[in-house]
Image: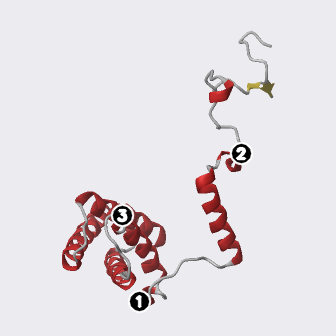
Amino acid sequence: MDETGFEESYNGCNLHESEPDFPSESRPNVMKPLHATKSSRNGSKRKEILLDFRTGTLDVTYPDNIRKNPNAQAFYGVVKEIIGETNDLTGKDELMGELALQVDEIIEEHSKVDWHDNMEVHNRIAQELDDLLYDFAKEHGLKLDFDQIDKIIESVKTVALRRY
């Protein structure tokens, strides 16, 4: 033990210097490996997804209208998940696929060289997506509040920034 009261060190660095003094039963799992901290609820789903990925049998199906468009497929996942929070989308896969295609068209129309850092382009995309989502929800009798629309816009922009 040195003058600071710490017993363990490695190459002169104290291993516990930045750890708060928690009782052992409430100590955070910061140092445990990732697989040791998984919750049982999410752990089995992750294992399923990993197994599907490794075997090439992903259990994701897309409507025919976006089957050959990987960008629209990504947007489909976003819009279907968020719109599905407050709407029954049973039998509306093609409709969600159509919305994903329209989102893809807006992104393609506005993406250009160096658009990632161009706030003017981001704002135009956001405005067009906002109009699209509002009109789409109204036309098809879907419930979408402003928070959901904003959530879709931000998620779509995140996906687009990674794909275009």
Residue sitting nearer the eye, 143 or 13: 143
Secondary element at tag 3: loop
**Identity of the amino acid at label 1?**
Asn
Residue sitting nearer the eye, 89 or 112: 89
Image point (71%, 76%), residue name: 55
Q: Tell me the colour scheme of the image.
A: secondary structure
Q: Earlier in the sequence, mark 1 or mark 2?
A: 2
**Identity of the amino acid at label 2?**
Pro
Image location of residue 126, percent across then percent down: 27, 66
Q: Earlier in the sequence, mark 1 or mark 3?
A: 1
Q: CA distance from mark 1 to mark 3?
A: 23 Å
Side of 138 where 156 appears, left or right:
right
Q: Which mark is residue 44?
A: none
Q: CA distance from mark 3 to mark 2?
A: 33 Å
Which of the two marks, 1 or 3, is nearer to us in this view? 3
Marks 3/2 in contact by CB < 8 Å: the verdict is no
Residue identifier under label 2: 33
Image location of residue 155, percent across then percent down: 39, 63
Image location of residue 23, percent across then percent down: 65, 22
Secondary element at tag 1: helix
Badge 3 density bin: few <14, some 14–19, many ≥20, Cα 10 Å? few
Image point (51%, 81%), residue name: 61
Residue identifier under label 3: 85
The answer to whether 109 is drawn above or below residue 17 in the figure is below
Q: Quadrant of residue 15?
A: top right
The answer to whether 71 is drawn above or below residue 124 in the figure is below
Q: CA distance from mark 1 to mark 2?
A: 42 Å
Residue identifier under label 1: 65
